[in-house]
Image: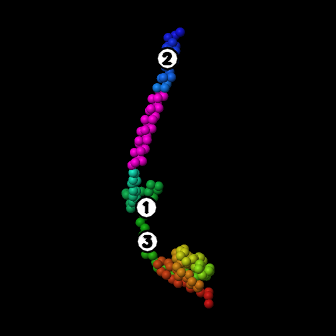
Amino acid sequence: MKPRIQFFRKLKPAWPAVLFAAALSARAEVSARAEVQTNDLQVVTNETHVAPRSVFIQPSSPKEGRDPFFPGSLRPYATTVVPNAPTTDLSSLVLQGTSGPPDHRLVIINKVTFAVGDEAEVSTPQGRIRIHCLVITEDSAVVEAGGERHILRYGGRP
């Protein structure tokens, strides 16, 4: 027989011990990694993370910044001038009808139905007006628009 084959035949009983030692060292390495990962997790969970507060400033010129989604847009730099709000003309509001039981009255003002506490926009010849219904009685309603209160009376009743 060749000497190489004889050598491996003599080592045959030693193979289980070699394999066992290799498996043992691999297992020890895995457990050491797990301990390191566990220690890292404990450190992370014991720390309190405070997220930094984000502060956004609206740029007033292209030198200060730009819109990241629309870089060529000049919209962020446009200044808006709000003119003085004209006084609301409530004379065009018309109470067109009332309905409902006394504990839950409804009124129709310029084709829009309101209950007490409702707020909505109604159409007038001057444009749309946002009104808030405060009180409803059998033949009248008190509404508020633009800080002014106005009593609307139902003209169809005798």
Q: Give amino acid for label 3.
A: Val
Image position of 69 with respect to 107: above or below: above
**How has the structure been colored for display?**
rainbow
In the rendered image, which residue does mark 3 sit on?
82
The answer to whether marks 2 and 3 mark residues whose Cβ atoms lie closer than 8 Å is no
In the drawing, does residue 84 fall left or right of residue 139? left
Mark 2 or mark 3, earlier in chain = 2
Q: Given the image, on which type of amino acid does mark 2 rest?
A: Leu
From the viewer's perspective, tell me whether residue 21 is left or right of residue 157.
left
Q: Which residue is mark 1?
A: 76
Comparing 80 with 37, the one in front is 37
Please give the name of the residue rendered at 40% of the width and 59% of the height, measured from the top-left corner: 56
Mark earlier in primary sequence (3, 1) = 1
* Image: magenta residue range: 22-47
Amino acid found under the numbered disc labelled 1: Pro
Residue in view at x 62 percent, y 86 percent = 156
- Residue position for label 2: 11
Magenta part, dominant SS: helix
- Residue depicted at x 48% and y 23%: 17
Check disc 2 and report its element: helix, strand or loop.
Answer: helix
Does residue 70 appear anywhere in the picture? Answer: yes
Is 43 magenta? The answer is yes
Q: Is residue 158 above or below residue 74?
A: below
Residue at x 43%, y 71% (from the top left corner): 82
Q: Position of residue 150 (x, y in %)?
A: 51, 83
